[in-house]
Image (cartoon, rainbow, N blue to C red):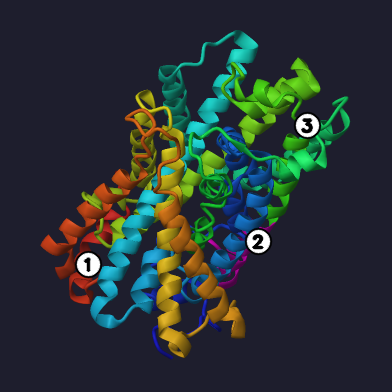
């Protein structure tokens, strides 16, 4: 049996050792808990609703509805390709480890290095996007309930407070986090059902089907309808991010080689269905399109709830949405910290010895938790000077994550029949699904770097390409100057392992 052999007949710990790692994290998650983390991070009550304003301006109801259908299908292809590889390599290292195993030996470390850096960038941006969205909706609720004036400065303060809460929960409430991730699934399912039910039966009037499925709105300043339709896909594509969490949590999951891939795929298709129902519910219930766009709350979904259901019911259901967003951000910090832990375990981040320390009390990477929260805060700060900063952060999340998602699939296609499958695989459909995945990611990577509003000024500039290039440039310089000599180098790894034993069991 080779190093890449199937995990059949091996325990989770034995398979992890076969992949080159020692079990350090506590393996206490069930298959449902693993799925729950990814489902929570996708969070249709977060992604769909925090970018609903963007969707209303960039294509309107038609793009919101049909864009969700199209993007969900394409995301399912990407997720199935990832799941097949996850089954073969169930480790928290996830995407960059997969790239290393699937790439040609001479360039394997380089492929892994850049995959890992794109994954880190995307993970931090997703955490920023989720918690910034939660801050925006919390600000809207406070405005309605207490006449709280929503300003960029106050939104950033709420954003920082939410990140602090999620950092503390992941530091001191590890068992609570696991429980809340499971609760979150039912919160989302029941929350969507209650909200859509209320929006269906309570309002006196609804929009027509031709409005929901055919109304096109362009408030971007761009003249090309096709361009605007393509830009409008960002709302759906941003929502469908973070499901790599199931891979990053495999070292804490029982039966990881099947639970991990199933968690990825299930989180996508269940979110696809739930999100479609949710978006139809909100869009049919719009009482005044212009009123929702210009709402003093700054959050059109909040205004739609108020207009359709009245103040009391609208505020209560807004709290349901905010709760889901807080669950989502908490899970994102968890998954983000595991990626940082794994990447720094291989020495790939500055001060790696700090970031891969594990608390002996909770057996979780506490320092990585706070790096995840701090990095997310930094990405959100440009909102103080740039009105399109939130859309830019979501673009960064999509670009960073999906490049990292698809690189292992590209390498798996190149490997062909030499790829040794795990117990969960696509059989003869593997190549076709992989080709669709790679093509789709190539399209959206270019698309979401483009300007989103015209005219392009310092206040409307999409800084996603800048952030991506800065991180990529830093990683490239470090690779050429140093990392190519030691990253994932077996000889170097043996030397570092002795130091890691001490570091991974010390308090940060």
Image location (x, y in percent) of residue 235 = 56, 44
Which sits in the foreground, 467 or 370?
Answer: 467
Quadrant of the image for the N terminus?
A: bottom left
Count neighbours of disc 2 (C-alpha within 10 A) and say few if under 14, some if 14 to 19, many if 20 or more: some
- Checking the image for residue 285, the label placed there is 3
Q: Mark 2 points at which residue?
A: 266
Image location (x, y in percent) of residue 282 = 73, 35
Image location (x, y in percent) of residue 313 = 78, 21
Q: Can residue 312 be seen in this view?
A: yes
Distance from disc 1 to disc 3, alpha carbons, whole Å, reads 54 Å
Left or right relative to 468: residue 447: right
Q: Name the residue under label 1.
A: 487
Q: Can residue 254 be seen in this view?
A: no
Q: Which residue is drawn at 51% across and 48% down?
A: 227
Q: Classify 73 as above or below 425.
A: above
- Checking the image for residue 337, the label placed there is none
Q: Give the range drawn in magenta.
A: 253-269
């Amino acid at each position: 049996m080779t190093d890449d052999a199937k995990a059949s007949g091996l325990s989770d710990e034995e398979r992890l050792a076969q992949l080159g790692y020692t079990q350090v994290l506590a393996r206490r998650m069930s298959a449902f808990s693993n799925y729950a983390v990814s489902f929570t991070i996708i969070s249709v009550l977060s992604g769909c609703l925090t970018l609903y304003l963007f969707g209303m301006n960039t294509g309107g109801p038609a793009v919101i509805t049909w864009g969700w259908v199209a993007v969900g299908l394409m995301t399912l292809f990407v997720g199935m390709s990832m799941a097949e590889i996850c089954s073969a390599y169930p480790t928290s290292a996830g995407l960059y480890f997969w790239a290393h195993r699937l790439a040609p030996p001479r360039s394997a470390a380089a492929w892994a290095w850049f995959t890992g850096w794109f994954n880190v960038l995307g993970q931090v941006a997703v955490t920023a996007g989720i918690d910034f969205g939660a801050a925006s909706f919390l600000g809207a609720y406070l405005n309605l309930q207490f006449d709280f004036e929503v300003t960029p400065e106050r939104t950033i303060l709420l954003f920082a407070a939410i990140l602090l809460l999620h950092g503390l929960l992941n530091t001191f409430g590890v068992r609570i986090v696991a429980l809340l991730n499971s609760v979150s699934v039912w919160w989302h399912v029941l929350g969507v059902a209650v909200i859509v039910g209320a929006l269906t039966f309570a309002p006196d009037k609804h929009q027509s089907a031709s409005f929901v499925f055919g109304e096109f709105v362009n408030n971007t300043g761009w003249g090309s309808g096709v361009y605007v339709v393509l830009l409008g896909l960002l709302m759906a594509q941003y929502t469908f991010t973070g499901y790599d969490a199931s891979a990053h949590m495999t070292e804490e999951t029982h039966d990881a080689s099947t639970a991990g891939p199933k968690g990825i795929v299930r989180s996508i298709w269940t979110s696809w269905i739930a999100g479609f129902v949710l978006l139809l519910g909100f869009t049919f219930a719009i009482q005044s399109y212009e009123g929702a766009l210009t709402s003093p709350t700054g959050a059109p979904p909040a205004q739609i709830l108020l207009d359709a259901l009245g103040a009391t019911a609208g505020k209560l259901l807004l709290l349901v949405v905010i709760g889901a967003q807080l669950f989502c951000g908490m899970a994102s910090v968890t998954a983000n910290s595991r990626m940082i832990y794994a990447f720094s375990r291989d020495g790939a981040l500055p001060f790696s010895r700090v970031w891969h320390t594990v608390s002996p009390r909770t057996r979780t990477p506490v320092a990585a938790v706070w790096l995840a929260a701090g990095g997310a805060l930094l990405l959100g700060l440009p909102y103080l000077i740039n009105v399109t900063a939130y859309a830019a952060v979501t673009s960064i999340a999509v670009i960073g994550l999906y490049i990292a998602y698809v690189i292992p699939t590209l390498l798996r296609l190149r490997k062909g029949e030499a790829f040794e499958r795990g117990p969960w695989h696509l059989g003869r459909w593997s190549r076709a699904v992989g080709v669709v995945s790679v093509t789709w990611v190539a399209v959206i990577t270019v698309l979401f770097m483009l300007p989103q509003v015209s005219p392009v000024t310092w206040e409307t500039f999409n800084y996603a390409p800048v952030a991506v290039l800065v991180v990529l440039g830093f990683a490239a310089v470090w690779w050429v100057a140093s990392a190519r000599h030691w990253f994932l180098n077996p000889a170097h790894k043996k030397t570092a392992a002795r130091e890691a034993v001490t570091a991974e069991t010390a308090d940060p």
